[in-house]
Image: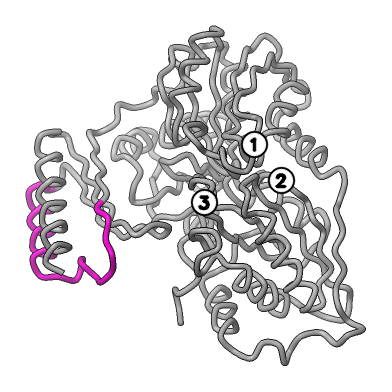
């Protein structure tokens, strides 16, 4: 059963198709509710969502399952994922639920679960919940007098805005900065512009009119071209692009150049290291982060700890080894002094703090290292295990040998889509391209033969 429902970031798939059906969502609510009951108090859940159409269906199905398990449900409405993680602790809930497929198109959806400590669930807890989904779970549900209640909670946006503002020094103002923020027609469409305005910035907000279908559609952190154009148009000092659930961020400098998660981590790590705030002597990222980041940190006598892909694994490593800066190249930045998960707005505020302290433009501050040439290609698969095939294994081994110690090769199946991701990097861009193309070609041949 392991892995049939949960992937690298909760449960995700096409809405109204397995596993993202109303029935599965209801059973997940039942199983999660039963898994987190401790003691005799009234148990509560905080439940947020992004702005996609299927959120209504999944939300109501999960409410039914959670109430059937005896949990009281606090409905937050559209709100960022990091706000759910924060409100689990603030409202002393037993579990947090975020209904979102993050940066995916509107027709996908997902379920992310948080424990009472605000952290995403471990593999072990997810496996336990998954194991309950195929059993006669109804036998363990609440009696008629023990059913849960559900109610909307007011003021949650204000709580999150105040939380985000408090991550900056009380004396710091963003006055004088013209900021374009792209909210991806997603969960942060109200809170992100409001927080930036309350901190004193001049704010131009785009993609803040969600209609259920336009979340992440040619906007947000995965499609920053519109933000780049707007920054030029209004002569902004910076552009901030969030994704659909606002747990990741990409920055655009005043010239329209993109600043990815690796450069953001480098900027924050250097700033915190200089101020004595950086903990653990390094930064945690994944195998996908650029070799240039590793070399940049090494020049400061700092270490880059690498994990498998998924911000959950980054956070687990940070907690285990006492580090407070981590993230992914894609823009999931985790600053554990403030948050238990990736927070696009809070990460952007730390970049803005660097701008205000140093009084230098983003283009000067954010180019901390020259990225090593890196190429990523995806191969769509329809099933099977192509990475176990002998020709594919041989091609991968040959690629690693060709790159040697001056490069890296990462091949992995996507945790959210039916893809094999092939990434190589090294100082010789032509060699990198040749290695990637050779492996992609073998994968495509293996797929065709199957």
Residue to which mark 2 is pinned: 78
Instruction: Judge left or right: residue 247 versus residue 425.
Output: right
Magenta segment range?
A: 379-404
Q: CA distance from mark 3 to mark 2?
A: 17 Å
Q: Which mark is residue 268?
A: none
The residue carrying pointer 1 sits among few (fewer than 14), some (14 to 19) or many (20 or more) residues within 10 Å by Cα, namely some
Residue 381 painted magenta:
yes
Judging from the image, the colouring scheme is one colour
Residue 30 coordinates in the image, percent (x, y): 70, 77
Residue to which mark 1 is pinned: 210
Residue to which mark 3 is pinned: 107
The rendered magenta stretch, by its main secondary structure, is classed as helix
Location of residue 128 (image quadrant) = bottom right
Residue 303 coordinates in the image, percent (x, y): 39, 45
Instruction: Judge left or right: residue 131 versus residue 308.
Output: right
Residue 403 coordinates in the image, percent (x, y): 12, 46
Give the residue drawn at x 16%, y 58%: 443
**In which quadrant will I find the C terminus?**
bottom left
| Foreground pick, 74 / 448 | 448
Give the residue drawn at x 52%, y 33%: 220
Check contact, mark 1 vs mark 2: CB within 8 A.
Answer: yes
| Foreground pick, 215 / 282 | 215
Residue 398 coordinates in the image, percent (x, y): 7, 56
Which of pointers 1 and 2 lies earlier in the amino acid sequence? Answer: 2
Q: Secondary structure at mark 3?
A: loop
Instruction: Judge left or right: residue 250 versus residue 128.
Output: left
Instruction: Judge left or right: residue 314 versus residue 337.
Output: left
């Amino acid at each position: 059963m392991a892995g049939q429902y949960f992937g690298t970031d909760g449960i995700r798939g096409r809405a109204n198709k397995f596993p993202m059906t109303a029935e599965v969502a209801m059973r997940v609510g039942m199983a999660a509710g039963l898994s987190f009951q401790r003691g005799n108090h009234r148990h509560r859940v905080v439940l947020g969502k992004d702005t996609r159409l299927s959120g209504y269906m999944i939300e109501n199905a999960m409410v039914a399952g959670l109430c059937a398990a005896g949990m009281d449900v606090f409905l937050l409405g559209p709100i960022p994922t990091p706000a759910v993680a924060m409100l689990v602790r603030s409202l002393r809930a037993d579990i947090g639920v975020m209904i979102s497929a993050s940066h995916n198109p509107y027709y996908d959806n997902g379920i992310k679960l948080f424990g009472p400590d605000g952290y995403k669930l471990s593999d072990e807890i997810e496996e336990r919940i998954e194991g309950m989904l195929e059993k006669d779970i109804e036998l363990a549900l609440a009696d008629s007098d023990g059913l849960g209640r559900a109610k909307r909670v007011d003021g949650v946006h204000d709580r999150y805005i105040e939380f985000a503002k408090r991550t900056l020094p009380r004396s710091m103002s963003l006055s004088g900065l013209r900021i374009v923020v792209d909210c991806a027609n997603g969960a942060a469409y109200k809170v992100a512009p409001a927080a930036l305005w309350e901190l004193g910035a001049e704010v131009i907000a785009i993609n803040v009119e969600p209609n259920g279908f336009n979340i992440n559609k040619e906007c947000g952190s995965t499609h920053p071209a519109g933000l780049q154009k707007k920054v030029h148009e209004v002569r902004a000092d910076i552009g901030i692009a969030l994704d659909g659930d606002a747990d990741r961020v990409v920055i655009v400098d005043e010239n329209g150049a993109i600043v990815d998660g690796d450069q953001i981590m480098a900027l924050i790590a250097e700033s915190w290291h200089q101020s004595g705030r950086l903990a653990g002597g390094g930064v945690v990222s994944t195998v996908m982060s650029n070799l240039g980041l590793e070399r940049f940190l090494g020049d400061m006598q700092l270490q880059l700890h690498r994990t498998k892909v998924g911000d959950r694994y980054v956070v687990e490593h940070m907690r285990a080894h006492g580090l407070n800066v981590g993230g992914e190249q894609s823009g999931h930045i985790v600053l554990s002094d403030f948050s238990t998960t990736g927070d696009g707005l809070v990460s952007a505020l730390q970049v803005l703090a660097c701008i205000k302290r140093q009084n230098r433009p983003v283009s000067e501050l954010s180019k901390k290292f020259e990225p090593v040439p890196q190429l990523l290609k995806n191969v769509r698969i329809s099933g099977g295990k192509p990475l176990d095939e002998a020709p594919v294994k041989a091609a991968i081994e040959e690629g690693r040998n060709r790159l040697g110690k001056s490069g890296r090769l990462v091949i992995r199946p996507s945790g959210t889509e039916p893809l094999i991701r092939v990434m190589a990097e090294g100082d010789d861009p032509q060699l990198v391209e040749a290695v990637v193309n050779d492996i992609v070609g073998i994968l495509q041949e293996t797929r065709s033969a199957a």
